[in-house]
Amino acid sequence: MNKISFVIPVYNEEENLPQLWEQIARVTAHLNVDFQLLFIDDGSTDGSLDLIRDLAARHPQIGYLHLARNSGQSAALYAGFQAADGDIIVTMDADLQNDPADLPEMLRYYGEYDMVIGWRHQRQDSLSKKIASRIGNGFRNWLTNENIHDTGCSLKVMRADMLKRIKMFHGLHRFLPTLMRLEGARIKEIKVNHRPRLYGTSKYTNLRRGIEGFYDVIAVRWMQKRHLKIEIGERHV
């Protein structure tokens, strides 16, 4: 573990960003490892970009990418993955619902595992969102032969060289455990804290998640079935 790259998509989260930076800085101060924090502004229409510029000017660990137009979370993450220079990539939401204080425990498993993902076992969301999430997770697990409790949790620790090999498409950020497994990743899921949203609003509705998720899971199932598994019996090159 040489350097951690935080990749955090941002869309209209100006009220949350100062606290998020403070919490990440507090946690990384005890990790004894280099880190960079990449904010990926996904065409925000509030003051998020100006605030990110100000934070980057004052803190050398902070960098950012500004997408010229709102392109969605998968696009923002993919852009950040390619720009990150750490050997470990950590993702989390910018809305403060993920808790950076969970990272030391997650990193404890890194090395034995190539991907450590959070499980929001006590979600601070509406009942309708909890029900929709349970149905969605069950459907995805059934079709993809997975056993992940919470594919939608953004708090993830991932081996960068594996992650960078994945070609992302719209919506596939929800399937990163499955896509990493196709690259040979060993995966660990642990329970993490989930906090109520204090500022801003959710960017997704249950209906939108359901419709997009149906198409996405069919695509991922196709990728699993058509994935090349090549075993070399003998080599002379």
Image (cartoon, rainbow, N blue to C red):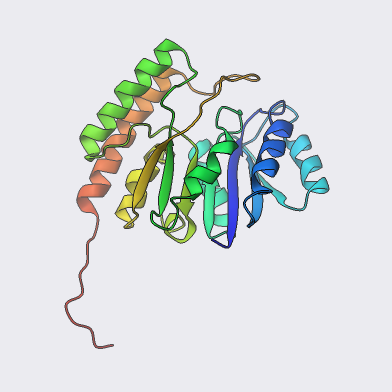
Q: For this rendering, which residue is in front, 94 or 101? A: 101
Residue at the spot x=68%, y=47% of the render?
A: 64
Residue at the spot x=69%, y=48% of the render?
A: 29
Q: For this rendering, which residue is in front, 181 or 206? A: 181
Using the rendered image of the protein, determine whether residue 148 is visible from the camera's viewpoint: yes
In the picture, the quarter occupied by the N terminus is bottom right
- Decide: is 36 above or below 55: below
On the image, the x and y values in percent for residue 144 come to: 24, 39
Q: For this rendering, which residue is in front, 143 or 98? A: 98
**Quarter of image, res 82:** bottom right
Residue at the spot x=24%, y=42% of the render?
A: 221
On the image, the x and y values in percent for residue 207 come to: 39, 18
- Farthest residue in the bottom direction? 236
Q: For this rendering, which residue is in front, 116 or 197? A: 116
- Farthest residue in the left direction? 233
**Quarter of image, res 142:** top left
- Farthest residue in the top direction? 127
- Decide: is 174 above or below 197: below
Horizontal side, residue 204 vs residue 48: left or right: left
On the image, the x and y values in percent for residue 87 come to: 53, 60
In the picture, the quarter occupied by the C terminus is bottom left
Residue at the spot x=70%, y=38% of the render?
A: 21
On the image, the x and y values in percent for residue 27 come to: 64, 43
- Decide: is 54 above or below 97: below
Horizontal side, residue 19 vs residue 107: left or right: right
